[in-house]
Image (tube, rainbow, N blue to C red):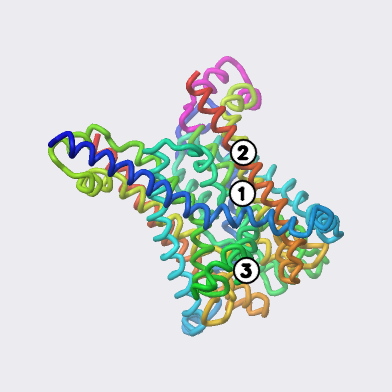
Amino acid sequence: MAGRSLRRDRAQSRLARVLLIGISLAFLAVILVVPVVSVLGYAFSRGLGVYLGALRAPDTLASIRLTLITAAIVVPLNTVFGVAAAWAIAKFDFRGKQLLITLIDLPFSVSPVIAGLMFVLLFGAQGWFGPWLREHDFQIVYALPGIVLATLLVTFPYVARELIPIMQLQGREAEEAAVSLGAGGWTTFFRVTLPSIRLGLLYGVILCNARAMGEFGAVAVVSGHIRGLTTTMPLQAQVLYDEYDLVGAFAVASLLMLLALFTLILKTLVEAFGARRRRA
Amino acid sequence: MAAARGWVSPSVLPGFGLTLGFAGIFLAAIVLVPMAALVMKAASLPLPELWRIATEPRALAAYRLSFGASLIAAGINAVFGFIIAWCLVRYDFPGRRLVDAVIDLPFALPTAVSGIALATVFAPQGWLGRWLEPLGIQVAYTWLGVVVALTLIGVPFVVRSVQPALEEVDASLEEAAESLGASRTMVFLRVILPTVLPSLATGFTLALARAVGEYGSVIFIAGNLPLKTEIMPLLIVIKLEQYDYLGAAALGLVMLCVSFVMLLTINAINGWRIRRAAGRR
């Protein structure tokens, strides 16, 4: 009797297992995998030649350049900020620390469109600094500085968020020992702190870069969509899509997707490496 | 020197002034001043006018779609995210690690890419749309499309919140309950679910907060008809394109307040989770 009910239990749980795994895979396939694979499908739908031709269009090349320039400015700035903020927060005790952490997190919960809107209200024609900027013939909104600022805001927390918990966990003894042995501040940071936060830092930089290159909403608001001048790669994909140039749009999208896959692979490797080091 | 400041504990480590100063100035320049600009611009409107803009029919319809679709999408993710996390933690199956890695894809994938991909795949002639068309289901350019897009971007939040909590469920408690005669359903409802519930709530709220402000992945598939398929962030963009800065600022302020409420909710749920975990030990 007991044996039979146990067997029935086993059969039931095997059925549940197959069913649940099936539901999971089907859900992910419809909502995630098919759309992602379709990017490549549509990009190559008219052959490799058309695909490569679409990528060599002057406006598309210009958008790739703009995206690279933006990331090259934004990622180092936010990295320096992240390291500085994590150092102050993890290595010192001061009043208002919790508030500072909350404020750093803020851009995560603000809509990208609102992020862009803020800079338009600040630097646009009717904004706070609008008249002054016009007088001095300096353009921020609908130009590179606006794109950089909006991207800075949306990617603001990434590096700091990765580093703060890691550096808090490490404590301060190693640095205190180094300083008491006569090492200067920079030496202590580069020789003691940096080697132990390398992986976390790399991880934060990778995520920051992926978001910086792929940001759409915030940049769309401040860019003005001037073709060949202020369209980043995601905006270029939109422009081409709106013009029914599907191959062109998906060609640009395929590059962004490769960036996302590259980011994921790098992230998985960093995690695996970190786990191995923790075990060792 | 540090002790003289009073609000910071003394330390032998250098660089406090430099790092906090730089972080503070950068934070102010990039986040706080722009945010103040938005609040002050909206506050320059007389209150009745602000209220009128924030509650005009087109805005009300946009709130309804943005919040309604976000709630449905977060709900879908709560259910399927829980199932996926369950499979990843409890079962070993071929491709498990690949599935685990794929979950993070929406974090890394630019929203414009998922946007045009979903719009094309679910269009009547698209890879998935052509199978749904004969069934009379139209996803692209309807509110269903908005739900699908918001579901995609929310996938990682619930899975990544629930996964560690499921790993912590005490197996001996489950066995004890079963040996006392509890059925699997009872064990699930009385042992597993209560342990995981705070994490599930966190994941749900994170997905909701992200969905409410989402723009890039939605606008391609949404159809963007005023009063029908127009989300709130899009309405703000449209106001800006019409040079209605005040209107955009007013709606932006409403959305900013919503973000703050979500942030506070997430912090409150986190506090609840930590208190409960501490109480169990």
Q: Disc 1, disc 3: CB below 8 Å?
A: no
Magenta span: chief secondary structure: helix
**Residue plotted at (63% across, 40% down):** A205
Q: Residues within 10 Å of mark 1 (few under 14, many from 20)?
A: some
Quarter of the image holding residue B215?
bottom right
Check residue B71 for magenta coloring. no
Q: Which residue is mark 3?
A: B220
Chain of the residue on which disc 3 is drawn:
B
- Residues at circles 1 and 2 in contact by the CB criterion of under 8 Å: no
Q: Nearer the viewer, residue B253 or B90?
A: B90
Question: Which mark identifies residue A265?
Answer: 2
The part of the chain drawn in magenta is A167-188
Same subunit, labels 3 and 2: the answer reads: no
Q: Residue at x 56, y 41 (%)?
A: A85
Local packing at callout 3 (Cα closer than 10 Å; few below 14, some 14-19, many 20+) is many
Classify B23 as above or below B46: above
Task: Give the vertical position of B149 relative to B143 (above or below).
Answer: above
Instruction: Please state which amino acid type lies under the numbered disc 3.
Output: Phe
Q: Is residue B61 above or below residue B118?
A: below
Determine whether, in the image, residue B234 is placed left or right of residue A166. Answer: right
Q: Are marks 1 and 2 on the same chain?
A: no
Q: Position of residue A144 (x, y in %)?
A: 77, 58
Q: Residue type at mark 2: give it.
A: Ile
Q: Position of residue B155 (x, y in %)?
A: 48, 53
Horizontal and vertical percent for residue B41? 58, 72
- Give the structural element (helix, strand or loop) at label 3: helix
Distance CA(mark 1)–CA(mark 3):
37 Å
Question: In the depicted view, which residue is nearer to us: B231 or A8?
Answer: A8
Dot 1 falls on a residue whose secondary structure is: helix
* Rendered location of residue B135, percent (x, y): 49, 72
Amino acid beneath label 1: Ile
